[in-house]
Image (tube, rainbow, N blue to C red):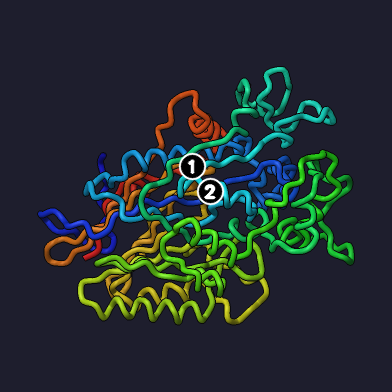
């Protein structure tokens, strides 16, 4: 593997090999999804060309019933070869950067944890949008059945024999086999990553009727009939998008939404590193993972009033300051921050709470602590590496692309120290290499097709992928 050297924060040493202090593998935006959930509104995707609906995308991907199979393929590959590409150090930790699940549901979370921790998982695709109801021709969603005319096959999507049975069958995972942890993302705790799971949408979620088409005459409106943007309408009344379902599906109690306390408790029970029963009791997802020479700080950036972008609280920043100060006082120790939202996405002002702060407040804290060398983020579904120069040497912000979308990759991150003190961060993109004919291989191919012209941007530039990042 070849790596591109990036020296925006300063040059690396002229010679010599560094000592690896920490070896991570990052997963992000897996978005394991129950495609049959009545709380989803896939029909919004049919309006993707209309600008006012685009902030809600994506509500549907034609291959999304295969996402947990793609996760399982990555877990299997890491279980078989849990070694970082550059240093050959066994991975110390697998870290998910949030959005482990798509629609904040218990059955989705159970599936994710069974795959990562080891076990059997199953999500049925029977009754979802892949099965036409005869009401519209051609069918507006992808139907794998060769005899059905649909809009996606007209765009080149394949017919796949026995797709629904295979996608709905049980999946057996060996688990990673080494330590793992996670931060919560917006999809982990909010319906479709956007709306708080309250009231009417929860009744729809656990019920037996699913909406496949835009409700007759539905257009987002406020009570006084003043039109509002679809995104704002979904934040406040998500049930309006999924009401009057005509398709009967099996009611599943495990489609109820996960609270933050339940999300943390489930991770503790599954063996995740970092969280304790105390975190679960308090609903506090901010924690640290200490290794011999590095502190990994996990920060919850979900906005408490809904919407998909993030923010941080004043009390969180005080806590973060304390954690970094402790590391600064221990000569030679380094720190890494991990959160779901990064600098571009800490912009949520919904609710106008003066105690919720944004990018500048967070980065001001980070720049006060020379021990901080990297900020690991997800959310945007793309690979990107940004330097943040600062008086203490600065830090690198490393964004990892998603598993639900192209390029369906994880990222190895190795932290090395060189003689003289220079720090090197080696980033390597990893594929699952699932065999042709497997569901994970099909997921990979369909994700590339669905990305279309956006695929190069999601893959990132060469300097966003396999890179060596230097900080003197």
Image depth: mark 2 or mark 1 in front: 2
143 relative to 222, above or below:
above
- Please tell me which residue is depicted at 37% across the width and 66% down the height of the picture: 289
Pinpoint residue 325: horizontal percent, then vertical percent.
33, 80
Q: Residue furthest left?
A: 15
Disc 2 target residue: 112
What's the distance in space between the residues labelled 2 and 1, CA to CA? 8 Å
- Please tell me which residue is depicted at 63% across the width and 64% down the height of the picture: 259
Residue 10 in view, yes or no: yes
256 relative to 409, above or below:
below
Residue 49 in view, yes or no: no
Task: Identify the mark at residue 348; answer none if there is no mark.
Answer: none
Pinpoint residue 232: horizontal percent, then vertical percent.
73, 61
Pinpoint residue 119: horizontal percent, then vertical percent.
49, 44
Say whether residue 216 is left or right of residue 287: right
Say whether residue 62 is left or right of residue 6: right
Q: Secondary structure at mark 2?
A: helix
Say whether residue 39 is left or right of residue 456: right
Disc 1 target residue: 71
Assess disc 2: are there few (<14), some (14-19) or many (≥20) residues with their C-alpha within 10 Å of its C-alpha.
many
Answer with the quarter of the image where residue 349 lies. bottom right
234 relative to 81, above or below:
below
Say whether residue 217 is left or right of residue 126: right
Q: Secondary structure at mark 1?
A: helix
- Please tell me which residue is depicted at 16% across the width and 56% down the height of the picture: 18
Pinpoint residue 448: horizontal percent, then vertical percent.
51, 34
Of residues 459 and 250, the one nearer the viewer is: 250
Answer with the quarter of the image where residue 323 lies. bottom left
Labelled pair 2, 1 in contact (Cβ < 8 Å): yes
Badge 2 or badge 1: first in the primary sequence: 1
């Amino acid at each position: 593997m070849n790596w591109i050297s990036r020296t925006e924060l300063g040059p690396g040493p002229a010679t010599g090999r560094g000592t690896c202090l920490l070896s991570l593998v990052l997963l992000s935006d897996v978005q394991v999804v129950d495609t049959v959930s009545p709380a989803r509104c896939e029909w919004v995707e049919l309006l993707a060309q209309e600008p006012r609906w685009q902030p809600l995308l994506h509500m549907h991907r034609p291959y999304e019933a295969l996402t947990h199979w793609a996760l399982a393929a990555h877990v299997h590959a890491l279980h078989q070869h849990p070694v970082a590409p550059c240093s050959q150090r066994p991975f110390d930790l697998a870290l998910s950067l949030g959005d482990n699940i798509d629609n904040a549901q218990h059955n989705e979370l159970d599936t994710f944890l069974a795959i990562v921790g080891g076990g059997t998982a199953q999500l049925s695709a029977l009754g979802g949008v892949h099965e036409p109801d005869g009401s519209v021709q051609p069918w507006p969603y992808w139907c794998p059945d060769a005899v059905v005319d649909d809009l996606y096959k007209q765009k080149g999507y394949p017919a796949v024999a026995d797709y629904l049975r295979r996608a709905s069958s049980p999946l057996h995972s060996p688990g990673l086999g080494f330590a793992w942890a996670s931060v919560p993302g917006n999809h982990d705790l909010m319906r479709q990553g956007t709306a708080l799971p309250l009231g009417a949408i929860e009744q729809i979620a656990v019920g037996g009727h699913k909406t496949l088409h835009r409700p007759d005459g539905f257009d987002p409106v406020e009570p006084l009939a003043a039109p509002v943007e679809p995104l704002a309408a979904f934040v406040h009344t998500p049930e309006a998008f999924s009401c009057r379902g005509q398709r009967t599906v099996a009611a599943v109690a495990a489609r109820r939404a996960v609270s933050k306390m339940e999300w943390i408790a489930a991770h503790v029970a599954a063996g995740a590193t970092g969280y304790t029963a105390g975190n679960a009791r308090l609903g506090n997802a901010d924690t640290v993972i200490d290794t011999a020479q590095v502190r990994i700080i996990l920060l919850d950036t979900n906005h408490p009033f809904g919407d998909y972008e993030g923010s941080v609280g004043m009390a969180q920043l005080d806590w973060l300051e304390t954690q970094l100060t402790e590391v600064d006082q221990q000569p030679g120790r380094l720190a890494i921050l991990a959160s779901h939202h990064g600098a571009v996405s800490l912009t949520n002002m919904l609710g106008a709470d003066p105690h919720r702060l944004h990018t500048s407040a967070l980065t001001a804290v980070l720049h006060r602590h020379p021990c901080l060398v990297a900020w690991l983020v997800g959310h945007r579904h793309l690979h990107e590496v940004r330097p943040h120069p600062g008086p203490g040497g600065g830090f690198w912000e490393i964004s990892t692309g998603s598993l639900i979308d192209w390029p369906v990759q994880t990222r190895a991150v190795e932290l090395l120290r060189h003689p003289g003190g220079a720090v090197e961060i080696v980033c390597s993109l990893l594929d699952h290499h699932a065999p042709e004919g497997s569901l994970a291989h099909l997921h990979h191919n369909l994700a590339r097709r669905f990305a279309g012209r956006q695929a190069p941007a999601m893959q990132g530039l060469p300097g966003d992928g396999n890179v060596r990042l230097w900080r003197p």
